[in-house]
């Protein structure tokens, strides 16, 4: 019997004032939809390094970790299969935002006026807003 385990991912909450950084997905699932920047953790990589790397690859900006928001593990959160995402809050260190890697676009949106989001990212952003009192 083959042992199955979930894949490990990270997502980044990058906020500037009352705006949050989102990427437009280039690939399926959810191609063309907006999402938090993030992706899969590489073997041998710390999750803290993975989220900084993924945000940089998808948005072009440097960030630094601020806090852990939470862990999201619903087996149905990703149509490709069971993934567990560790979500971090990050501070932007640069401002030249541009889509890259798996993102066709990247830009800041007002937290109170978000487009439809991929995966469970609406829930994640609601959790963030509750945590910071918005």
Image (cartoon, helix red, strand yellow):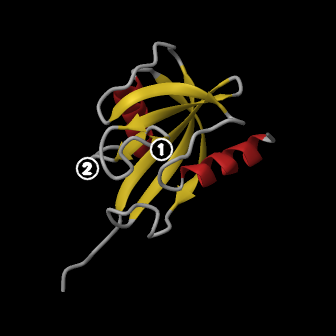
> For residue 11, which numbered disc appears in the image?
1
Q: Is residue 33 left or right of residue 113?
A: left
User: Mark 1, residues whose alpha carbon is within 10 Å: few (<14), some, or many (≥20)?
Assistant: many
Task: Choose between 60 and 44: the one closer to the eye.
Answer: 60
Task: Choose between 74 and 22: the one closer to the eye.
Answer: 22
Q: Residue furthest right?
A: 133
> For residue 134, which numbered disc appears in the image?
none
In the figure, 88 relative to 18: above or below?
A: below
Task: Report which quarter residue 48 is drawn in.
Answer: top left
Q: What kind of element bears circle 2?
A: loop
Reading the image, the residue beneath label 2 is: 43
In the figure, 116 relative to 85: above or below?
A: above
| Whole-percent x, y for residue 115 in the image | 58, 40
| Whole-percent x, y for residue 15 in the image | 62, 29
Q: Residue furthest left?
A: 1
Q: Is residue 99 visible?
A: yes
At horizontal 45% and vertical 21% (from top left) the residue drawn is 62
Q: Is residue 128 left or right of residue 56?
A: right
Quadrant containing the C terminus is top right
At horizontal 72% and vertical 43% (from top left) the residue drawn is 129
At horizontal 46% and vertical 13% (from top left) the residue drawn is 96
In the figure, 31 relative to 60: above or below?
A: below
| Whole-percent x, y for residue 133 in the image | 81, 41
How many numbered tags mark residues here? 2
Q: Is residue 49 visible?
A: no
User: Mark 2, residues whose alpha carbon is within 10 Å: few (<14), some, or many (≥20)?
Assistant: few
Quadrant containing the N terminus is bottom left
Q: Which of the marked residues, 1 or 2, is nearer the chain's N terminus?
A: 1
In the figure, 111 relative to 129: above or below?
A: above
| Whole-percent x, y for residue 109 in the image | 60, 29
């Amino acid at each position: 019997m083959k042992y199955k385990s979930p894949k490990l991912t990270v997502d980044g909450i990058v906020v500037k004032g009352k705006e949050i950084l989102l990427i437009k997905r280039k690939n399926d699932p959810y191609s063309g939809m907006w999402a938090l920047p993030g992706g899969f953790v590489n073997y041998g990589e710390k999750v803290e390094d993975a989220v900084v790397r993924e945000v940089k690859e998808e948005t072009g900006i440097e960030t630094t970790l601020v806090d852990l928001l939470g862990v999201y593990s619903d087996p149905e959160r990703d149509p490709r299969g069971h993934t567990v995402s560790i979500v971090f809050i990050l501070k932007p260190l640069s401002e030249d935002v541009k889509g890259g890697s798996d993102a066709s676009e990247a830009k800041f949106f007002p937290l109170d006026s978000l487009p439809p989001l991929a995966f469970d990212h609406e829930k994640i952003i609601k959790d963030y807003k509750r945590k910071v009192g918005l």
